[in-house]
Image (spheres, rainbow, N blue to C red):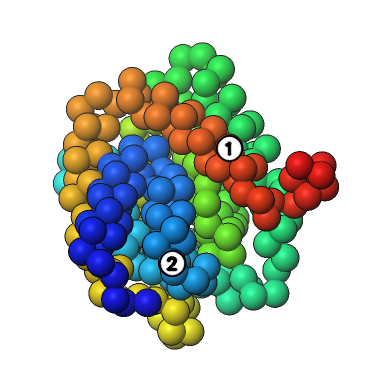
Amino acid sequence: MEDLSLTLTLLLCAAAFLAGFVDAIAGGGGLITVPALLLAGFAPVEALGTNKLQGLFGSGSATVAYARKGHVDLRAQLPSAVLSAAGAALGALLATIVPGDVFRAVLPFLLVAIALYFALKPNMGDIDRARRLSPFLFGLIVVPLIGLYDGVFGPGAGSFFMLAFVGLAGYGLLKATAHTKLLNFASNLGAFAVFTVVGVISWKIGLMMGVAQFLGAQAGSRLAMKIGARIIKPLLVITCVALAAKLIADPANPVRVWLGI
């Protein structure tokens, strides 16, 4: 689907800018862009593929911004990035056989739990704490699992990375955000490669939205580095709750079907 009106194209680019801004700080940019693409008339699989294309610009932009300020060592994190990409590529391949209803039913409750964790946990700031899992096990087990989830389903992957970095790796919020963007970029790249082979990407609108997302991510990452935990923590909580609400509100969500809503 390439032929869109100028107004609709501008609205999609505005959504991409906002998504890039939010995603660079707290994740959850797909909460904005995927529904926007669906409302614009894209088929679900085309919306997911196009979202991965434009999402590369946002996560890549934020990663470079954080790396330039020394918040993430790209070379040291390269093995984890490769595992994240590999997990996402496998997830994208599995997406056609894994029942999405399982994720749609469970994810809202997981996101609310993550929101409560960050909202209620005291003394959560930008200072690193004691890690609960060695870097080797974290990279070998946790990273590819979240990457796999990102490829299979996607929404909330950034929040899961944030939770893992804070809860298991002991990172402060700003450092966790910076590393999340790198691994999110890698998982986007892995899933994007599979969607490219399948041929479900709308390149024209995806590239235009990508430019807007790049600019939004630059603005969001700079604000996060300037303010730190004061902006990251509340925006992360809001994003998780909003994503959970959006998933529950979806008429196709099996929870609504089970409850007869």
Residue plotted at (41% across, 80% down): 196
Q: Which mark is residue 4?
A: none
Q: Which mark is residue 245?
A: 1
User: Which of the 4 image quadrants contains residue 13?
Assistant: bottom left
Q: Which mark is residue 41?
A: 2
Instruction: Give the number of marks.
Output: 2
Disc 2/disc 1 C-alpha distance (Å) = 22 Å
Q: Identify which residue, 253 or 71, lies in the foreground.
A: 253
Q: Position of residue 45 (x, y in %)?
A: 51, 72
Residue plotted at (41% across, 43% down): 27
Element type at mark 1: helix
Amino acid type at mark 2: Gly
Element type at mark 2: loop
Q: Identify which residue, 120 or 249, lies in the foreground.
A: 249
Q: Is residue 90 above or below residue 158?
A: below
Evaluate whether residue 257 shows in this view: yes
Q: Position of residue 19 (x, y in %)?
A: 33, 47
Residue plotted at (40% across, 29% down): 235
Disc 2: CA contacts within 10 A as few (<14), some (14-19) or many (>=20): few
Q: Is residue 170 above or below residue 59?
A: above
Q: Position of residue 261 (x, y in %)?
A: 76, 42
Q: Residue furthest top?
A: 122
Disc 1: CA contacts within 10 A as few (<14), some (14-19) or many (>=20): some
Evaluate whether residue 64 shows in this view: no
Q: Identify which residue, 45 or 150, lies in the foreground.
A: 45
